Image (cartoon, rainbow, N blue to C red):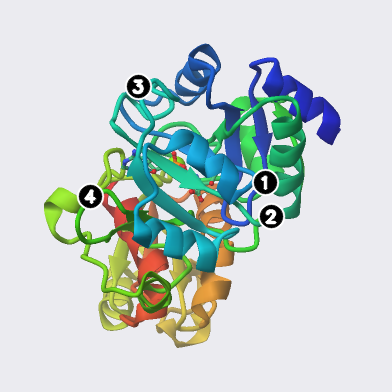
Amino acid sequence: MLAGAARALADGRLVAFPTETVYGLGARADNDAAVAAIFAAKGRPADHPLIVHVASLAHAAHFAAELPGVAQRLMTALWPGPLTLIVPRARQVAAAAAGGHTSIGLRCPVHPVARALLAEAAHLGVPGVAAPSANRFGRISPTLAAHVLAEFGDALLVLDGGPCEVGIESAIVDCTQRRPALLRPGSLTRAQIEEAAGEPLRSRDERSARAPGTLEAHYAPRATLRLMSREALVVALQVLGPAAAGVAVYSQIPAETLGVQGRSKPRHKLMPGNAAAAGHELFAALRELDTLGVSLIWVEQPPDTPEWEGVRDRLQRAAAA
Ligand code: TXA
Ligand code: MG
């Protein structure tokens, strides 16, 4: 299966594969036609850059015009792992994968299936694999092989690595400017990245630092998702009364204490109280709540502490959709 998948990549075909964050939809990054097939399958605008996945630090150098010191420090400390680095792109290399930008996003995943696939493909002459999350544009990222099949149908070659451990996409750090910037929070905390970088990160909150393609609205379930404080959630359910039965609730506050009983009870799923556990199940939980056929998903705002930054970011964007 793995050898066949590596061969398919080498031949310019698409392969979906597990990483520790989410499943990726991959194509060899040095083949613009293969990369174009990713954009077509996802329905993604061609100027939204893809992340190129590499087997090792040495392969990263192939795609980069230079590896700034901060990028080298981050690679050494945190690769392989759920961290993408934006660096200046080598001329004439992987232009389609980079969406035409002069920079390129590089990531060396730690998932054993991804690592084996990248190493095997590298033996066949594939320097790196461009892979966005394996979902249609704007929709919820897949954390199970079954999610990928639900998005693209079973004609696609999908390597099944079971559930993704991390569950939300990699943190992205832009290393092309004088000071590094966190463009997308992930499971690594800001403090962990800053320690490895040896300097503070600029925030994504400075508008200009938002990565191209990281839209305000993303991860859209079919139902309308609203984020609310615990207090607002309890009050809103009381106000709804019997109509609360048409709402799905995802909260850390247990169903018994939501203050709604009997036949007007909303559908409820308990959010883990631990940020890593919540990230691990987040996208599967949103998909599950979305299949209940409700028109509203009400989510309790997770804690405002550093380790929840990645989960808060994904929920805010799902709510903006
Ligand atoms: O965890 C992940 O990063 C997953 C797995 C499959 O590795 N991949 C992923 O890819 O999330 P995708 O395409 O869904 O998100 C990639 C994001 C883009 O939306 C863009 O914001 C940013 O990475 N990006 C990629 N290349 C960039 C570049 N040259 N400059 C700025 N941002 C870039
Ligand atoms: Mg994505």
Q: Are marks 4 and 3 in contact (CB under 8 Å)?
A: no
Q: Label 1, label 3: how many angstroms apart (C-alpha)?
A: 24 Å
Displayed quadrant of residue 237: bottom left
User: Which numbered disc, 2 or 1, marks the residue that appears first in the sequence?
Assistant: 1
Q: Can you tell me which quadrant of the image ligand 2 is in? A: top left
Query: Which dot marks residue 46?
Result: 3
Between disc 2 and disc 1, the foreground one is 2
User: Which numbered disc, 2 or 3, marks the residue that appears first in the sequence?
Assistant: 3
Q: Position of residue 163 (x, y in %)?
A: 70, 56
Between 223 and 135, the residue placed more toward the observer is 135
Q: Label 1, label 4: how many angstroms apart (C-alpha)?
A: 26 Å
Say which residue appears at 31% left-offset and 24% top-offset: 100
Crowd rating for badge 1 (residues with CA inside 10 Å; few <14, some 14–19, many 20+): many
User: Which numbered disc, 4 or 3, marks the residue that appears first in the sequence?
Assistant: 3
Say which residue appears at 34% left-offset and 26% top-offset: 99
Q: Label 2, label 3: how many angstroms apart (C-alpha)?
A: 28 Å
Residue tagged by mark 4? Answer: 210
Say which residue appears at 31% left-offset and 80% top-offset: 304
Q: Position of residue 221 (x, y in %)?
A: 43, 46
User: Which numbered disc, 1 or 4, marks the residue that appears first in the sequence?
Assistant: 1
- Amino acid at pointer 1: Pro
Residue tagged by mark 1? Answer: 18
Q: Are marks 2 and 3 in contact (CB under 8 Å)?
A: no
Residue 236 appears left or right of 267: left
Location of the N terminus (image quadrant): top right
Residue sitting at the far bottom: 257
Q: Label 2, label 1: how many angstroms apart (C-alpha)?
A: 7 Å
Q: Is mark 4 within 8 Å of ligand 1?
A: yes
Residue tagged by mark 2? Answer: 111
Crowd rating for badge 2 (residues with CA inside 10 Å; few <14, some 14–19, many 20+): many
Residue 70 appears left or right of 283: left
